Amino acid sequence: MSSFLVHPLTLRLVSVVIAFGTWEYLGRIPISPAFPTFLETMSALWGMLMDGSMISVYPATFQPLLIGLIISSILGIACGVFMGLNHKAEWFGAPVFIVLQSAPLAALIPLLTFAYGIGLTSKIITVCIMSMPVIVLNAYTAVRHTPTSMIEMGESYLGSRRQIIMKIIIPAASPVIYAGLRLGAAMGFIGAILAELLITPTGIGDLITYNQSIAEYDKMYAAIFSIMVFAVLFIEILERTEYIFFRPDKRVTQ
Amino acid sequence: MSAAAEAVSDNAPQIAVEVDHVTKIYPGGVEALNDMTIQFPRGELTSLLGPSGCGKTTLLKIIAGLLKQTSGTVKVNGVDVTGPGKERAFVFQDFALMPWASVMRNAAFGLELQGMSKSEREAIAEKYIDVVGLKGYENLYPHELSGGMRQRVGLARALAVNAEVLLMDEPFSAVDEQTRRKFQEDILEVVDDEQKTFIFVTHSIEEAVYVSQSIALLLPRPSRVSEIIRPDIRRDISPDAIRRDPVYLDIVERIWQGLRTYVE
C-alpha cells in the first residue's frame, strides 16, 4: 500500500489531479469571467477536436516549429560541439550566444518582420532565435566537461581524434546536450506561438487570438491547453530517443 | 627468490622501459619531475611508491605518452616514446569506464578503437573478462557494478589489447579495503600468468611490498628515485601468511622509516 502511494506514477497522477482541481476550483469562484473552469475547457477542447477546427490549424503551427527546431538542433549542436572542442571557436562564439540567451528576443520580432516579411521565414527564424542559444550553450558546456580521464583513455588506446569525439565525447556529452534540446524545444514552442501572436495570426495562435476577441474563453484556453500538451509530449519523446540512441545504461535503471 | 625472478633467470632481467634524465615542468612553473632516471625490468611488477607530490603519476603518464616531458627521453623496448603506443596499456585510477557501454563493450573498447571486427574483439574481451573474474557480468553497465568490479573491467580492457607494458595509476585507491586485498592477490596471479611488464603507482606501502618484484621509492622536492627495493618475500605461502611474514613486515617498516620524514 505504502509503496503504491509513493510510486512515481501515483505521485504524477496526484500532482495532475491537484493542478486541475485547483484550476476547476478557481474557475468556479470565479476569479474572472475570462477564466473558464477546467471542465468547460475540456468540453470545448473535445468539441473543437470533434468538429475538426483544432486539428485543421495545427499544420500551420507545426510547419515553422518543426523546421525551426530541426535547424536549431542540427546547427546548434554542431556549433556547440565545435565550440567545446576548439578554443578559437569558443572565443568567437560563446559571447554571441550568451548575449542571445539573456536578451529579450521577442523584442526582435518586429525587426524580423521588417527584414523577412510576414511569411514562413520570419516564423522559422523566430523559433530558431528562441531555441538555438540554449541548445548551443548546453552542447558547448557538455563537451567542455567530458571527464579528462575518459579522453586520456581514448588517447592511450590509440583512438583517432574522430573516434574520441564520436565514441567518447559525444556520448559523454549527450545527457547535457539533450537537456539543452529539451529546453530548446520548449523555447521553440514559445517562439512559434509568439510568432503567430505577433507576426500574423495563423495556426493555433490564430485560434487563441480569435477566440479571445469573440470572448469564447473556454475555446481559447482549450487551444492553449492543447499546445501545452503537445509541447510536453514532444519533450517526452525527445527524452526517450536519448535513452534509445545514446544511453542504454539509463534504460536499465528505469 | 620470487617466481617472477625465476622466470627471467636465464638472462639478467632485460629492460622494458627506460626513463633517462626526464624533467617535467608544468605550464606555470611547477616542477613535477627533476632529472629522473629509472629502469623497469621486463616481466616484473615494479611499483612507484612515494608520498603525494613526488611525481609518480606524472612519470607514469609520461611513460604512457599522455604527457610530454620537458626534457629527457623515455624508451620502451629501446624505442623513443613520442605518444601513446600499442605496446602500452593504461589502467586508470578512476577506472575511466564509459557509463553508457556494457562491461563487454568497455572491455573490448581498446580493440574497437583499433578497428577490430565486433565478433573478433568480443571473443578476446570475453576471455579477459573471465581472467579478471567477471564472467557472467558482460551485459551489465558500470553503474551496476561495485568499485572493485569496475576496476576489473579496466584491467580486462588493458589486458585485451595485449600490450607488453601495463601502466597502472593507483588502480585500487578508489576501491574499499577488503576488495583491494582480494584484488592484490588476483593481480599477483595475473602478473605470473601474463608475463607482462607492470608499472604500478601506489601510495600504499603495504600494497607495494605485497604485489611488487621491485619498488622504486620516489621522494619529493626535488623529485628523485631514492632507492630501489626488491622485497624478496616468499610467494609460496598463503596471502595471509605473507601479510604476517616477518620479512614482509620488516620491509614495510623500513620503507616507512625512509618516508616518514617527508610526511611529517
Image: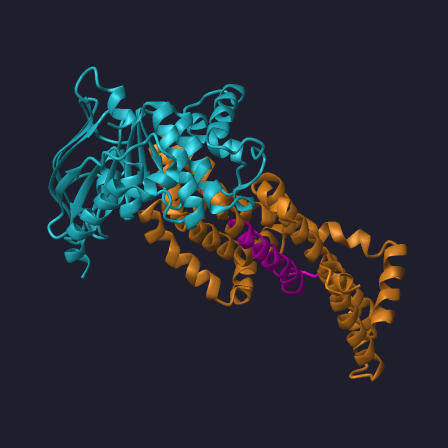
Chain colours: A orange, B cyan
Taking B123 as reference, is B28 left or right? left
Taking B254 as reference, is B158 left or right? right
Above or below: residue A118 compared with residue B144:
below
Q: Quadrant of the N terminus of chain A?
A: bottom right
Report whether residue B96 is seen. no
| Front-most of residues B215 and A173 | B215
Percent position (x, y) of residue B99? Answer: 51, 43
Taking B2 as reference, is A46 left or right? right
Above or below: residue B112 compared with residue A226:
above
| Front-most of residues B110 and B254 | B254
| Front-most of residues B192 and B165 | B192
Q: Quadrant of residue A150?
A: top left
- Residue at 81 percent across and 52 percent down: it is A55
Percent position (x, y) of residue A198? Answer: 63, 65
Taking A29 as reference, is A81 left or right? left
Percent position (x, y) of residue B154? Answer: 42, 37
Is B209 a magenta residue?
no
Q: Quadrant of residue B214?
A: top left
- Residue at 74 percent across and 49 percent down: it is A59
Q: Main secondary structure of the magenta part?
A: helix
Is A198 a magenta residue?
yes
Q: How many marks?
A: 0
Above or below: residue A163 compared with residue B147:
above
- Residue at 21 percent across and 52 percent down: it is B53
Magenta part of the chain = A177-201
Percent position (x, y) of residue A132? Answer: 52, 54
| Front-most of residues B94 and B208 | B208
Report whether residue B30 is seen. yes
